[in-house]
């Protein structure tokens, strides 16, 4: 089985920064796409930032230029650094990974880490 464990959320003032981390563990052969989604109350889950095994990235338009997704493939870990945070960034942030585990490839999610941007 594969588990994703996030850390790094919390309360941040507008204009502040934070870094989220997500480590995958378990029976992992390789990880394809790995990144972050978020879901605010009353809204659908949306892609924030994601990175392929080869290093290609994709970002939500509203976070482009103030967020960086990165990963450490040796540690099966993905990071999200967000700067100039806004109240509208407040959401539950979920780690996502597309994992090859044994003969199967599947999507795995973390339990979520809350990010609240407020003064």
Image (tube, rainbow, N blue to C red):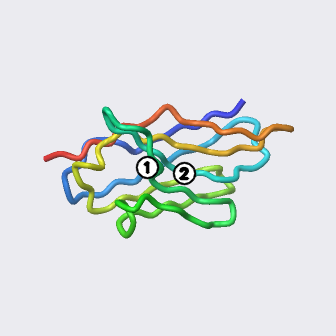
Q: Badge 2 is on which residue?
A: 35
Q: Quadrant of residue 113?
A: top left
- The numbered mark, 1 or 2, whose residue comes first in the sequence reads 1
Residue 14 % position (x, y):
19, 54
- Residue 38 lies, with reference to residue 15, above or below; the image says above
- Residue 13 lies, with reference to residue 15, above or below; the image says above
Looking at the image, is mark 1 or mark 2 nearer the viewer? Answer: 2
At x 76%, y 36%, the residue is 27
- Residue 74 lies, with reference to residue 28, above or below; the image says below
At x 43%, y 49%, the residue is 20
- Residue most extreme to the left: 119
Label 1: few (<14), some or many (≥20) within 10 Å?
many
Q: CA distance from mark 1 to mark 2?
A: 10 Å
Q: Disc 2 on helix, strand or loop? A: strand
Label 2: few (<14), some or many (≥20) within 10 Å?
many
At x 69%, y 53%, the residue is 32
Q: Disc 1 on helix, strand or loop? A: strand
Residue 20's label in the rendered image is 1
Residue 51 % position (x, y):
58, 59
At x 49%, y 31%, the residue is 111
Residue 59 % position (x, y):
47, 61
Q: Is there CB contact under 8 Å for labels 1 and 2?
A: no
- Residue 6 lies, with reference to residue 19, above or below; the image says above
The answer, for residue 53, to whether it is visible in the render is: yes
């Amino acid at each position: 089985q594969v588990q994703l464990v996030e850390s790094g959320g919390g309360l941040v003032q507008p204009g502040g920064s934070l870094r989220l981390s997500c480590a995958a563990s378990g029976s992992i052969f390789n990880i394809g796409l790995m990144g972050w989604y978020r879901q605010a109350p009353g809204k659908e889950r949306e892609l924030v930032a994601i990175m392929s095994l080869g290093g290609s990235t994709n970002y939500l338009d509203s976070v482009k230029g103030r967020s960086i997704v990165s990963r450490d493939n040796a540690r099966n870990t993905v990071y999200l650094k967000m700067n100039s945070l806004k109240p509208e960034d407040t959401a539950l942030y979920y780690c996502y990974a597309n994992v090859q585990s044994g003969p199967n490839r599947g999507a795995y999610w973390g339990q979520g880490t809350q990010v609240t941007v407020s003064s």
